[in-house]
Structure formats: structure tokens, C-alpha cells
Image (tube, rainbow, N blue to C red):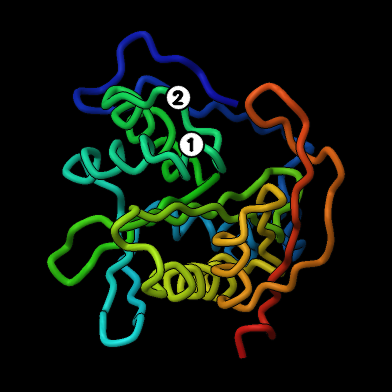
């Protein structure tokens, strides 16, 4: 698990991992090591132990960079999370303030990469300005299945940015993280999210009745899936 550290290193995080090993758990010579170099866990540790990579996607004539979210993006993130459509279809705090964006980056985005539980890609135009975010989350109980979420700045909607970015992120998840399936969910009626997912190759597989708690009430949600062969 994790321990809260009383005296973290200068510039380090206030948490540390703790583990244990008993004599009987040592692998015998010639036996496979449960978390050895050829396992999925080791593969992902090698990924998340390095800086977040930069991906690229093309939407029309525009080349997009998918990079780590940074402090300079937070003003635009805040404006997007104050947008009426973002509030309607997502679970962002309302009213959304700059400190929410700061906490999101500090307490969620960066720790998730350090723990290997999720990655947030900032989608940037050629001038490196933030126009969207794509989150790929790795639930602990289903190591081969991830779920994806995304949002776009109001001024960048309708340009094909999200399908291109979503395709790039999912391809990275399949090839680099060894995923077998990526799932997408959206509240029924969120046709913009559904269009983006379908253009990226997702198949809408059904409706989960009362599938999500959204702003105080249960709502139906669409669910879709993307498999590696869907991107071929």
C-alpha cells in the first residue's frame, strides 16, 4: 500500500509505497517470477517510471500534440469547465474555480501517472495551446480494460480534434500498455461525445439504465467499446 511520509525528500511526494517479502514467496530457480521482466506489471512499470510521452495526431490539416497537462494550461481548462455544456455533461465542480484546476493537476493528474493508474493527455494545437484533454484510466480490478473520458474547449469543437486525439491515445494504450479493450461512457443525450467516440472507432454497445449518479440523480448512460482490431 501507501504510507504518508513524515519527512518527504525535498521536492518529493508526501507518500511512499510499502511492500513485503516472505521467505516462502521467493521464486525457486527456473520458476517464473510473478512480476518478472516479461509480465504486464513490469511492462507498465517501465512506462510509468519515465516522463509522460508526447503523442501526435492529425485532424484535417492540423497536427496536434498530445502531451502532459501543465500549469500554463489551467486557465483554459478553467474556462472550459465553466462552459454550460461541460457542466451539463460532466461531473466537474460547479461553479468551477481556478483552485479546482490547480487541485486537479496536483492531486489527481500527477499522482495518477506516478502510481500508474491513469494518464491525462493535454491536446495542443501547433502553437502548443491547450484545446482538449483525454483521460485514460486503468481500474485495478480489470488490468486489460481501461476507460476513457475527454472534454474540448468550446472554440475548438467541431474540428475533428477529439476523434483524432482519442484514436492516438487508444492506440498507445493497446500497443504500449497491453490493453485488450477501452470503454467509453456518456450520459444518454450527449450526442457530441457519442459522435467523437464513434468516429474514433468505438462501437456503442448499449444503454446502462440508471448507470451513473449525476448531480444528485441516477441517469442512463451509453456504453461503447474499442478493441485493437477496430483501429486496423
- Mark 1 lies on residue: 87
Q: Give residue 148's mark.
A: none
List x then y, in percent, for residue 21.
66, 33
Q: Is residue 200 above or below residue 97?
A: below
Horizontal side of 29 relative to 126 (left or right) equals right
List x then y, in percent, for residue 213.
72, 30
Cα distance, mark 1 to mark 2? Answer: 7 Å
> Does residue 46 show up?
yes
- The quadrant the C terminus occupies is bottom right
Picture mark count: 2
List x then y, in percent, for residue 205.
82, 66
* Residue at the limit of the structure toward the top, as seen here: 6
148 or 207: nearer the eye? 207
List x then y, in percent, for residue 228.
66, 79
196 or 109: nearer the eye? 196
Other residues around mark 2 within 10 Å, as few (<14) / some (14–19) / many (≥20): few
141 or 91: nearer the eye? 91
Mark toward the start of the polypeptide (1 vs 2):
1
Amino acid at each position: 500500500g501507501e504510507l504518508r511520509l513524515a519527512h518527504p525528500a525535498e521536492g518529493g511526494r508526501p507518500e511512499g509505497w510499502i511492500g513485503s517479502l516472505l521467505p516462502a514467496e521467493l521464486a525457486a530457480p527456473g520458476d517464473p517470477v510473478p512480476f518478472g521482466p516479461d509480465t504486464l506489471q513490469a511492462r507498465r512499470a517501465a512506462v510509468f517510471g519515465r516522463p509522460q510521452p508526447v503523442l501526435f495526431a492529425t485532424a484535417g490539416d492540423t497536427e496536434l500534440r498530445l502531451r502532459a497537462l501543465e500549469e500554463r494550461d489551467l486557465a483554459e481548462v478553467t474556462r472550459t469547465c465553466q462552459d454550460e455544456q461541460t457542466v451539463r455533461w460532466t461531473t466537474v465542480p460547479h461553479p468551477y474555480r481556478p483552485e479546482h484546476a490547480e487541485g486537479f493537476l496536483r492531486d489527481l493528474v500527477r499522482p495518477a501517472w506516478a502510481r500508474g493508474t491513469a494518464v491525462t493527455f493535454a491536446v495542443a494545437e501547433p502553437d502548443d495551446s491547450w484545446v482538449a484533454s483525454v483521460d485514460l484510466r486503468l481500474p485495478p480490478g480489470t488490468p486489460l480494460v481501461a476507460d476513457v473520458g475527454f472534454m474540448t474547449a468550446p472554440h475548438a469543437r467541431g474540428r475533428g480534434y477529439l476523434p483524432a486525439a482519442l484514436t492516438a491515445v487508444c492506440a498507445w494504450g493497446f500497443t504500449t500498455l497491453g490493453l485488450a479493450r477501452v470503454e467509453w461512457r456518456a450520459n444518454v443525450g450527449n450526442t457530441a461525445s457519442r459522435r467523437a467516440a464513434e468516429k474514433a472507432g468505438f462501437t456503442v454497445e448499449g444503454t446502462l439504465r440508471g448507470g451513473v449518479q449525476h448531480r444528485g440523480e441516477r441517469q442512463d448512460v451509453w456504453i461503447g467499446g474499442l478493441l485493437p482490431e477496430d483501429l486496423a
